[in-house]
Structures are given as structure tokens and as C-alpha cells.
Image (tube, rainbow, N blue to C red):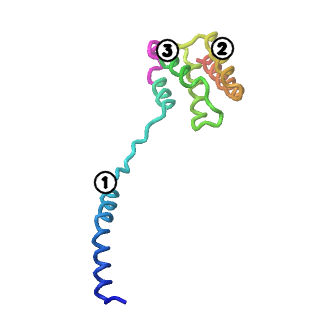
């Protein structure tokens, strides 16, 4: 229908019009920042701080308050459920933070807030109290 040079010119114009889109895509891929910082969870930060300030009651009390405020309830199928249980045990075993009657109140408040985890909480605090007695 048309001369072959017409089709060559059309393809050339099409290619030239697509070049900015291709270069913009390549530039976007090249400038994309794949280095996303992996943020440490607040539970693991609390656990590290608890271990760090194990003998300082003034610093432990705000940690316990933050734990009770932010993590009093935690789903049993949660990502860091094991760490949550370990943190409960670490709070209970620390003699500088709570007396035995306070540990029992701590256990009761956690069990009432997490009825599905009652057995795990009781076991963790029981082990913590045994560790306390052996110290």
C-alpha cells in the first residue's frame, strides 16, 4: 500500500518517542534504594534493655510499665510469642524489680488479659520463681 520507506520512518519515529520512557524506567530502577533498614522490634529492644539494666531498679520500672502498657496482651500466634514469654519470665525472675507478691499480681493481670496463653504464662512465671529461689 505504502512505500517501505514510510514504514521504516514510522518505526524510527515510534522508537525515538519510546526512548524517553525506556530511559526513565532504567533511571528509576538504577536510583531505586533497595537498602531498607530492618527495624528491630520493640519487644527485642525491651529484652535487651532488661538484660542491660538488670541491677538498676530505677531503669527497670519504666521498662515494666512500657511492657504492661504496650504488650500486656499478645496473640498466641504472634510472630514473637516466644520472646514475649521470655520477657515475662525475665521480669518475674528479677529480684530488683518485683517482690514475690508483685510477681503474683503481674501473673494475674497477664493471665486475665491473655486467657488463651494462661498455661504458658503460668509455666514461665513458675520457672522464674524457681530460679529466684535458687539464687
- Earlier in the chain: of badge 2 and badge 1, it is 1
Residue at coordinates 32% horizontally, 62% vertically from top-left? 26
Q: Secondary structure at mark 3?
A: helix
Question: Residue under circle 3?
Answer: 61
Q: Secondary structure at mark 1?
A: helix
Q: Which residues are magenta?
A: 52-60
Residue 80 lies left or right of residue 54; in this view the side is: right
Residue at coordinates 32% horizontally, 63% vertically from top-left? 21
Nearer-the-camera pick, 24 or 36? 24
Question: Residue under circle 1?
Answer: 31
Q: Secondary structure at mark 2?
A: helix
Q: Where residue 75 sits in the image (x, y, percent)?
A: 63, 32
The image quarter containing residue 126 is top right
- Contact (Cβ within 8 Å) of mark 2 with mark 1: no
Separation of residues labelled 1 and 3 (CA atoms)? 46 Å
Question: Residue under circle 2?
Answer: 104
Q: Where residue 65 sits in the image (x, y, percent)?
A: 52, 17
Q: Magenta span has 56? A: yes
Q: Where residue 127 sits in the image (x, y, percent)?
A: 65, 24
Amino acid at each position: 500500500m505504502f512505500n517501505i520507506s514510510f514504514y521504516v520512518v514510522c518505526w524510527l519515529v515510534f522508537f525515538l518517542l519510546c526512548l524517553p520512557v525506556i530511559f526513565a524506567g532504567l533511571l528509576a530502577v538504577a536510583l531505586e534504594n533497595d537498602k531498607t533498614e530492618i527495624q528491630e522490634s520493640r519487644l527485642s529492644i525491651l529484652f535487651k534493655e532488661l538484660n542491660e539494666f538488670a541491677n538498676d531498679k530505677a531503669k527497670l520500672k519504666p521498662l515494666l510499665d512500657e511492657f504492661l502498657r504496650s504488650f500486656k496482651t499478645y496473640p498466641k500466634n504472634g510472630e514473637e510469642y516466644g520472646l514475649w514469654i521470655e520477657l515475662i519470665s525475665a521480669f518475674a525472675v528479677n529480684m530488683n524489680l518485683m517482690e514475690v507478691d508483685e510477681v503474683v499480681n503481674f501473673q494475674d493481670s497477664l493471665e486475665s488479659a491473655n486467657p488463651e496463653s494462661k498455661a504458658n504464662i503460668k509455666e514461665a512465671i513458675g520457672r522464674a520463681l524457681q530460679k529466684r529461689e535458687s539464687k
